[in-house]
Image (cartoon, rainbow, N blue to C red):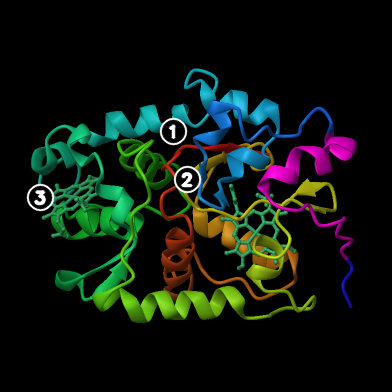
Amino acid sequence: MVAFKLGALFVAAAGFVMANAAVYAADAPNLNDPKIAKYVAGDKWSGYVTSTPETRKMQDDDFENPSFVWVDQARALWDKVDGKAGKSCASCHGEVEKLKGASTTYPKFVDKHNDLITVEHQIGICRTKYMEADAWKWEGDQMLGMSALVRLQSRGMPVNVSIDGKNKPFYEKGREFYYQRRGHFDFSCAHCHVDNYGNMIRSELLSHGMPNGFPQYRLKWQKLGSMHRRFRGCNKNTRAEPYKQGSPEYTALELYTMWRASGLPVETPAVRK
Ligand code: HEC
Ligand code: HEC
């Protein structure tokens, strides 16, 4: 049934370095290194921990991180008047720095919009409803850059989503999705990111599949990409049906995976292979 070959299970975090040494001597993450320890919260690691030293280095330095091309474009867009209402983001929000901390609680149920919404949904509402401007495509450069700029204001702050109140049914839906086997290979998200993190799958070292660094720059994509694009990729890799970016399915899944990442720092814009 399973066409993937999973390596020997690496024990707990502490055993990682030793167990991994033979396979990946050069790349083995040292969880005691203070730089890496920042990306560990309890028993959860961000993908930074399982990244290659090369991509970690790119992420550590904003001048080397290619994401900042999009982020800098978004800084200019923040002040740009657009749409029939004659407003820019700054007209209503002032300095973008004021959004510090805001993204850590998304996705969340917003009464006014009567739905669970992500940062991208909110930006879309501000564009179309409040500015009366054209909608930005979810995976377009403007939306990716703006989402990254907004989330960057919270970089280093712990992910802090709520799974109570009106968020609860969405959390449950997301959790169900996460554990549901699907596709030709009959894999759930949990098969790879809960049961096999630290193992090799094909040529990749599996992480916990954490969402705290999106939008992120992937060398494979050669551009910034959204979290929902990554969800699509993981669904497609197991030949399961992918959903649309921004769909209710992936928005609920975003809440569940963000809850898993509770306490990990926002690291947008991350860099990954
Ligand atoms: C067959 C194994 C497999 C399955 C099943 C799978 N993924 Fe992944 N996923 C990967 C691999 C490989 C990567 C890239 C290396 C890594 O970070 O684990 C990845 C990366 C990710 C990342 C990016 C992590 C980062 O730090 O950038 C997220 C988020 C993610 N997966 C979420 C999911 C979700 C949600 C599901 C279920 C819809 C899922 N994955 C199912 C293999 C899988
Ligand atoms: C006409 C005023 C107005 C403009 C222009 C506007 N917004 Fe908003 N924005 C709001 C209001 C009001 C809210 C509160 C939620 C709501 O009512 O939808 C909000 C909420 C937000 C939030 C969530 C903040 C939080 O604390 O949770 C983000 C992020 C955001 N806007 C981004 C943008 C971006 C990016 C632009 C420009 C593309 C923009 N907004 C333009 C009025 C505006």
Where in the figure is residue 199, as x and y percent of width and height? Answer: 78, 53
- For disc 1, the marked residue is 70
Q: Nearer the viewer, residue 102 or 218?
A: 102
Residue 91 inside the magenta-drawn segment:
no
The residue drawn where x is 84% and y is 47% is 203
- Seen as rendered, the residue at the extreme top is 63
The residue labelled by disc 3 is 85
Query: What x and y, as percent, mark residue 157?
Result: 34, 40
Which disc is residue 215 wearing? Answer: 2
* Residue 171 in view (yes/no): yes
Q: Is residue 12 left or right of residue 116?
A: right
User: Helix, strand or loop at disc 3?
Assistant: loop
What SS does tag 2 mark? loop
Q: Nearer the viewer, residue 258 or 137?
A: 258
Q: Are marks 2 and 1 in contact (CB under 8 Å)?
A: yes
Q: Earlier in the sequence, mark 2 or mark 1?
A: 1
Which portion, as a residue range, is magenta?
4-24
Q: Is residue 15 magenta?
A: yes
Label 1 sits on a secondary structure element that is helix
- C-alpha separation, residue under disc 1 versus residue under disc 3: 25 Å
Q: Earlier in the sequence, mark 1 or mark 3?
A: 1
Q: Quadrant of residue 100?
A: top left
Q: Left or right? Give the position of 206 relative to 70.
A: right
Q: Is mark 2 within 8 Å of ligand 1?
A: no
Q: Amino acid at mark 1?
A: Trp
Distance, label 3 to label 2, CA atoms, is 28 Å
Calculate the distance from the C-alpha at mark 2 to the C-alpha at mark 1.
Answer: 10 Å
Tell me which label, 3 or 2, sits earlier in the chain. Answer: 3
Q: Is mark 3 within 8 Å of ligand 2?
A: yes
Residue 265 in the figure: left or right of residue 121:
right
Name which residue lies at 60% across and 77% down: 179
Q: Quadrant of residue 126?
A: bottom left
